[in-house]
Amino acid sequence: MVGGIQRGQQCNTKDSGCRKTTKKKKKKEAVNLPLDGLWYNGLLTPSGKSYYVCFKNKVMATVQDDSDSTGSWLNARSLHIQELLTPSLTPKGSSSVLGHQSPVEVLIGDQHTPLTAVLSPEAEQLTDRNLDMNRRCLDDVITTVLTSEDTLLAKRRVVVLTGPAGAGKSVCVNKLAQDWARGQVLKGYELVLHLCVSECVTTWVSKVRECGSVSEKEERKQSCLSLENLLMLAHPHLSSTTVSYVLKEPSSPTQPRLLLLLDGLDEIPHLPDISELLLSPSSLPLCSDPRRPVPISHLLSSLAQGTLLPAASLLITSRKVPDMDALPPGVKRVEVLGFSTSQRSQFFQRFLSEDGDLAPKMTQLCESVFGVYEFSSLPLFCWTLASVGRTLQQTGGAPPETLTQLWAHITALSLRPSVSPEGATQVPPLPTLLRGLAQLARTISMDGRGFCSQEELLSVGLEPFLSSPQLRAFLQEAIDAHGAHTFFFLSPMMQEFLVAVSLFLEGCGWVGSMDELLTDLEDGMMEFAEVFVAGLSETSQRAPLEGVLEAGYAAEQGTGFQRWLQTHAQQALDGCSRERHLRCFRLLRETQNQTLVKRSISSPSARLGISYGGLGRADCAALSYVLSCAGEIQRLNLYNSKNLTSDHTSQLLPVFKMANSIMLSQSNLTPGALAHLAEGLRGGSTTELDLSYCSLRDEGLRVLCPALSHSPLHTLRVPVCKLTAVCCKDLSAALAVCALRVLDLRGNSLTDEGLTLLCNALKSQQCKLQELSLHSCDLTAGSMSALSEALSCGHCPLTSLDLTGNDLCDLGVNTLSNGLGNPSCKIHTLKLFECELTDSCCAALAAAVRSGGSLAELDLSCNDLGQEGALLLCESLKAPECSLISLSMTRCELTLPVFSALEEVLCDGSKLQALALGLNQVGDTGARHLWRALKHAHCKLQDLDLEMIGLTDDCVADLCEAVRAHGSLKTLILKNNSLTDSSIPSLVQLAKACPGMKELNVQYNDLSEDVFELMDSCSRIRY
């Protein structure tokens, strides 16, 4: 109420003007001032003038002119601040479970939780991995942008605040205005005006229509608004003097006098996109006269492009996110990110503080249900979840477990009969209402629209419900810029749910096979409709709707969809498409039909072991549900999972316990995720865990170690995990009591200190470790004494030891050889690849080789053993006690005498079956010794690697003769030599003539495409 008259109050006058009834006995003469089809009726009073914005005796707004008073501007500004700080709580619209709290109610009711945002173009550069780190307080971002020097000095001071419906944009701008009124922010602005443009347009058009019947042409003309009209409609407490002051140009071009907060533009149908409103030149005519009525789109475009109030700053809210390239230079964009995970939890705790343990249950719902988490950053959506959860709890129900259950509950609650003022329950024909809404949702969705006309609404039988609260619980009425009534669903997801409902109702226009129907849904760009169809196909998911949906229910649709889903899932799971797998998991989980799930994944060819890395929280829940239904999981592959948090792994905990093998290589696991993984290992079924290239660090491994002693884990791979000697104390304690057989620690800086600690565990009688990889662990000779002692203790179970890439040098290997030569040593495989060795260590190593121990495989590649060292080793190979069957001396500076000695070894009854001699430049001459050895009856070689030793075509005849004579060679590696096309026919014939040969490798020789077809004729040739 302003000046004793409320907006919209009928004036009791006998003429066509308006006047104010006062307590003064003497009435002043009214002065009618026509302006653009409106009448401003002024009455002289002691305090000034009162102006009524009227149309045909109908008061549209009342404003007070205090121009005759001292300090009128300051008084008006104070009045505006008072209005902002004492807002009216008059409810607008009807109450609905989909949300009816106005921004003012949120702020006054202390329901506001601070939101987060990011400033574009930063948003385009963010990934899911660093998004949370770049979140900033929304209020801080906006005030910083609006008061920054580059904004104030810009030619166009426009900031676009973007975010989906329900993201909290309206609450934000209301709070911004209130905070300004309290003097907390934006202190440089003299006036901050919040304009909900959609409400102003609706009010204006409604008042025009209430004033009598007019022609459509005249109505459209009268639906035009001037900027002056808009300001007074939005803020009727402001005087005309204040509005005139607002419309004046500032004395300084850079003085930030006025900030307009333009909200609700998205609720005006047919309004151009925000990018188009901001672009110049525009297809929309622009105006510069603030008193000239123009169509609302022209008015907004003129404001945005600066022809109206060019010195004002504008903050415009928009649901659509315009491309930064589509915005004019200087326009800033702030993207609302909504709730972070912690803020969402804080919201539920605040809202449901008196509802027992409901808050954590709703938080869990957000984390686990596909379609819920995706929208759980939106405050309005969280408010809906909390409202539904509270209502269900109060009636003894449980929180929904699927997206379908959630929206079935929302629909059922929205359809609840209302109570009339007399107390009699009004029960509308609910099946008719639901059918009409479903038909309407299908029509506008398939046409790609977000709204419908009143004629379309009536055409689906909803006329009896036009004034019912049930209809308003689903649809919101709006008036477009031309004055036409339109309707749109309060929630886009509700619209998709009703589209899915329409599929199961007879007579809703769906015709065709299930594939065709689902293709239609996909063509309609509906992300969740298919999920809703999956849920509605199962009776338990439809339960909240009870008998409403069953009226006219097409039962064959549900059966048909489940048949389609089973077939589709079996086909998808036979392939390797991660996205197709996850889609099926989401649909199967939505049905909550374990029998259907088991049938769908039971195919022997189902590839459930493909990588599912990078799952979202809801996908983790879906994967966990489906695999848990299987009862047993051979392999859980989560390779390359980035940002695997506690929320993700809490969903995966059941499958952690069930999986025989878990692969998490190249993943990022938070401490909380590692804790859940450890819990899954403890008492679970996992025997193999791969954490390769995960940044565990010592703290992460410390979390896992206690679980090892309560786990059947046999293999643990933690290479390149940023471990140090610090973790080895915990690891050593675990190794002494756990069942671990294989431990891969490659690429971690354990140093001698760490290995010394591990050696303590190797000496334990309970230790079961058999394979240990210490490749590139920064070891030196300093730890070899402890290792040698462990190998000699008689209890050490190690059979395989990889020391590749450590600077052991000759001293280290000399010390290690003492343990290797001990009869108690069980080492079968030893890798000393690239350990800075020379011939000085070969005597001790040769002694260990001929000691009669268990050493069978030795890799000495990439060490400068030279001729003398290699000859010492060759002598040891002749000893009857030598058990070596595999020797690798690739790139060891070997010479022709060494190859001659190897010929003698191979012909003298040696046990050698595999020999790798690549990268030693001995050419055809050196190889000739090996060809002669292959012909000898005592030669047992099966695998021979001669990569890059300088072979030419001249050796091929002898090679083929020797291989044929030997008859037992399985692999022959001839890579990186100088063989040409002329050698290929002979090699192909050789491969074909030796059925026992598995591979003849001639890659990277001087071959042309002319011989490719010939080599293709033999599958055993690799080129």
Image (tube, rainbow, N blue to C red):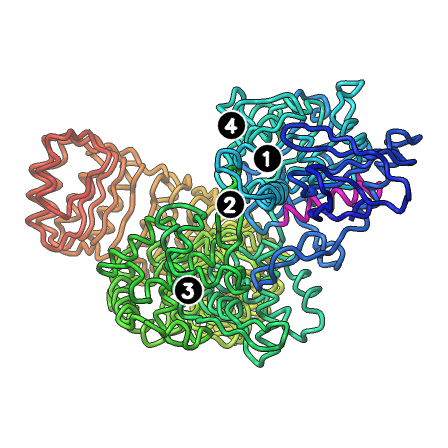
Q: Earlier in the sequence, mark 1 or mark 4?
A: 1
Residue on which the image places disc 2: 809
Q: Is residue 185 above or below residue 461?
A: above
> Taking 104 as reference, is 498 left or right?
left
> Taking 259 as reference, is 1017 left or right?
left
Q: What x and y, as percent, mark residue 715?
A: 44, 65
Which one is in front, 347 or 66?
66
Q: Which mark is residue 120?
A: 1
Dot 2 falls on a residue whose secondary structure is helix
Q: Earlier in the sequence, mark 1 or mark 2?
A: 1
Residue on which the image places disc 3: 623
Of the two numbered discs 2 and 4 in the rendering, the one whose residue sits closer to the viewer: 4
- Disc 4 residue type (three-letter): Asp
Dot 4 falls on a residue whose secondary structure is helix
Q: Is residue 335 at all visible to an observer of this figure?
A: no
Which one is in front, 246 or 776?
246
Of the two numbered discs 1 and 2 in the rendering, the one whose residue sits closer to the viewer: 1
Tell me where the magenta segment starts and ends, as one range. 168-185
Residue on which the image places disc 4: 325
- Disc 3 residue type (three-letter): Leu
Callout 2 crowding tier (Cα within 10 Å): few <14, some 14–19, many ≥20: some
Q: Is residue 117 above or below residue 766?
A: above
> Taking 566 as reference, is 13 left or right?
right
Q: Which residue extends farthest front?
A: 14
Dot 1 falls on a residue whose secondary structure is strand
Q: What x and y, as percent, mark residue 249?
A: 75, 20
> Taking 256 as reference, is 860 left or right?
left
